[in-house]
Each structure stands twice: as C-alpha cells, then as structure tokens.
Amino acid sequence: MKRELVIIDDDPIYRLIISKMVNTIDASVIIDECENCEMGLAKMESLGQLDHDVIVLLDINMPKLDGWGFLDEIEKSNILIQPQITIYMVSSSTDESDLLKSKKYKSLRGFFCKPLSKEVLKTIIGID
Amino acid sequence: MPQRLPDYSEKLSVLIIEDNQGDFVLIEDYLLEKFKSIEIIHFTNFANSIDYLQNPKTKVSLILMDLHLPCLKGIELINTILAYNFHIPVVILTGYSDIDLAKKSLQIGVYDYLIKDEINPVILHKTIIYALNRSSFINQIEAEKSNYENLFNFSPQPTWLLDSKSLKIRNANDAAQKKYGYSLTQFLEMSFTQLFPIEEEELIKHKLISQEYELNSDHFTHFLSNGEEIKVDIYFREINGRSTHGLIVQSNDVSKTLQHISTIEVQNEKLRKIAWTQSHMVRAPLARILGIINVIEMEKMDADELLFYLKQLRVSGNEMDEIIRKIVNETNHIEKQ
C-alpha cells in the first residue's frame, strides 16, 4: 500500500536522518521534506483527493509559524476531512506543558520526543 | 482567684488633722488598740499638715481629717486638700450636724466619713481597712491605665483610636504620626477614611462600621501626608469605655512585602523560561546527536558518509555547548539580582 510521509521541521539534519531511516525501513514510502510550516501547509493543500495514507511528522519549535500555529491553521481548513491523514507531533522538548497542550488538539494522533527510534518510526508508518 | 489583700497590721502610718485634743486622744486610743504597729502623725491645723504631706518623713497611708479646722472648713477644706492630689485616701471626721455635707464629700473624692459620736474601735478599724483596699484597687487600675496608654503610644505599629460611628480620629500614636507625617492635632481633625483613596472610602467605612474584622483579602491603599501611596493591611477591634464606643485600628505597611513578592514572581517567570529553553534548546542538538547515532547504527555507510555525520555530530556538540553557557549566564544574572 502506498504511503506518504510529510516531515515538517526546520532542521535539515533531522529531516535527513528521518528520510534515511524511513527509507531503510520501507523504501516505498514517499517522503516530502518541508523546512517550515508555510511549506507544510502548501503541501497539505496540494494533496487533493487522496488514494493513499499521509503521515505528518510535525515539529513544535520553528521560526515564524510554529507547530501549534500549523495545527490551528489546518483545523480551520477542511483538509482533515480525509481520514487518510494522521498527524504526529515530534519535538525535542520534554517539557510537560507541551505534552499537555498537545492533548487539546483533536487533529493530533500522538506526541513523540526526539530522537525517533527505529521502532517508533515503524509504528508511525504502520509497518508493525 | 480573689486577690490577696495587703496586711495592714504593720507599717501603717495615719495622719490625723484634728484641732480638738479630746477627739484626737480618743481616736489615737482606738487606733493603737486595733493596729499593732501604727505610726500616728498629728497636726492641729491645715497648713502644717500640708507642709508635712509635701515632705513626709514616712509615707502616709491614710488621712483622717476633721471637717472643721480653724482656718478652713467644709467643702472648701475638702476641695483644697484633694487639689494637692497626694494619692492618699482621705476619711472625714464629722458630727451629726454635718451629715449632709459628709455625704456630699463622698461624691467629690473623699473615701469615707465617720460620725464622731458613733466611732468605736471596730468601726474605725473597718473604715480604715476598706479605704486602704479601695485605694489599692484604684492605684492598680490607674497603673494599668497607664500601661495601656504606653502600649498604645509606644507600639511601633501605627495605631488610631476612632469614634465607632463617625470614624473620626480620637487619638493617634507616635508611630502613626511618624509614619504618616501628620501631627496629633492634624489627625484629630480628620476622619480615618480620609487616609484612603476615594474609591476605597465606602468599602472601609462599611467594614469598620459593621465591624467586619476579616477585611484584608485585598490590600488597602493609604496616602501619607506627603502624597506618597502605601499598601496596607488594616486590623481593628471594638474598644469600649464607660461612656465611649471606639475602634482601635492598626495599619501594617505591606508595600515592601508586595514588592518582594512581585520580584520573586518575575524571577520565577525567568526560571520557567530557563526551564523551557532547557527543554527546547538544549534538547534540540542533543536529540539530533542521538538521531545521528541511530542512523549510523542502522545504515551501512561508506567513509565519506560517515565523515559527514561525524561533522554533524561536532556541529551539534558545539551548539549545545553554546546554549549551556547561555543558560548558566542567565541563571547567574538572576542570582545577582
């Protein structure tokens, strides 16, 4: 089954690491790297009618629009009507306030702390 | 427990002002009969008595005085001796003819009177003991009154005495005068509510008049005479005299405390920020380092690729070093404040 992974993160090394690891786990996964939320939103809007699963890994701390801002925007739009989309928050933060805040967003499937291990990535893209 | 009364069988000293030698001898006999160790001082006229009282050889415990002396008599005599304010109980010796006068003298401040024709050792003894006890109680009350006055005046807390209805200031202690910069005369022309800003006046008026003692959930504002504004907590209680209903009120300047609290809150906010930075900024390069290690462990890679990741490890390591230095600096900055 075709899967697409959207990485929204301003850290190029992090994006590279995730791409590498996901590629090793399952080379068929299509990977889109977005270095900011604006690009991420544009990507989401361009998805159109989906015939495959889309998994979003969203960073919190980014210049200009941050991860929370991204969620606010996307919850306002009708992009999420499609059930194929799942969003995970991924942050280097271990601050409890971020975890608590993440629970307020219905559009979020989960919250993970960086770095993502191979096992977590497998769960996220649904290999296990 | 009833208070133990002093034992008057010893060291009693009675001054008798009596111009009739016969009457004096009789009273002296009775006194010597009833009191084991008594010193009797006798004068036949008023002037000599006053001279002695102003400079007594031994402390006089009680004065027995005839109501008719050669130069002075009656009410005038009583008023004159009381005016000296010797703080010694005075008992009048008189005859039946002056009974009305004797009764009246009790209202002026004489302790008791004795009708000469009725005097016997028992009555004399009892009268003297009663007078001395009463005088001792009065002295005690006077002493306590002065203690309370000292407590009021020398309290380091600004304290006022107010009329419980009009809330006009009836008295203000030294601390209040010093703290607020008003003299007692100025305070006495003011209502207590004048110290508050207009918007708090009604509230404090209501609380004081209805005697709601719990009133410091919010702090009050007071203006000093120089216009300076302070934050205060107000404490008060009802205080009742025989004819007066008052409130005793204290103010506690909490401006400094509130300032400290706000300083601490600012510092806490900074510390929270540091904790947040810690979590986000420090963990960012750390998470990257761990992520790189994950990749290196997972992937088979050639020497060039490995070199690339090694370089990234160094970049992240340096980034982390810089962030930690910054946090240490910020923390030091807070400590110095």
Image (cartoon, coloured by chain):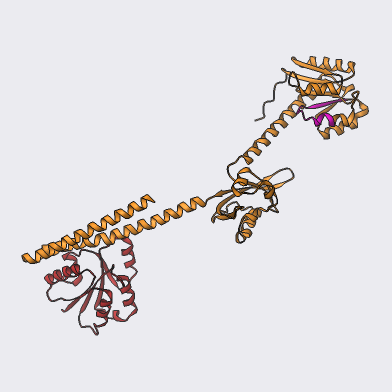
Chain colours: A red, B orange
Can residue B275 be seen from the camera position used here?
yes
Q: Where is residue A63 in the image (x, y as percent from the top left)?
A: 29, 70
**Quadrant holding the N terminus of chain A:** bottom left
Q: Is residue B84 magenta?
A: yes
Q: Is residue B106 magenta?
A: no
Q: Which residue lies furthest to the bottom in this view?
A: A49
State which quadrant residue B123 falls in.
top right
Which segment is the magenta one?
Answer: B79-93
State which quadrant residue A20 falls in.
bottom left
Q: Where is residue B21 in the image (x, y as percent from the top left)?
A: 89, 16
Vertical side of B148 occupied by B7: above or below? above
**Quadrant holding the C terminus of chain A:** bottom left
Q: Tally the numbered discs.
A: 0
Q: Position of residue B61 (x, y in %)?
A: 75, 23
Left or right of residue B110, residue A27 in this image:
left
Q: Position of residue B36 (x, y in %)?
A: 75, 14
State which quadrant residue B111 falls in.
top right
Q: Which residue lies furthest to the front in this view?
A: B226
Vertical side of B327 occupied by B134: above or below? above
Left or right of residue A25, residue B225 in this image:
right
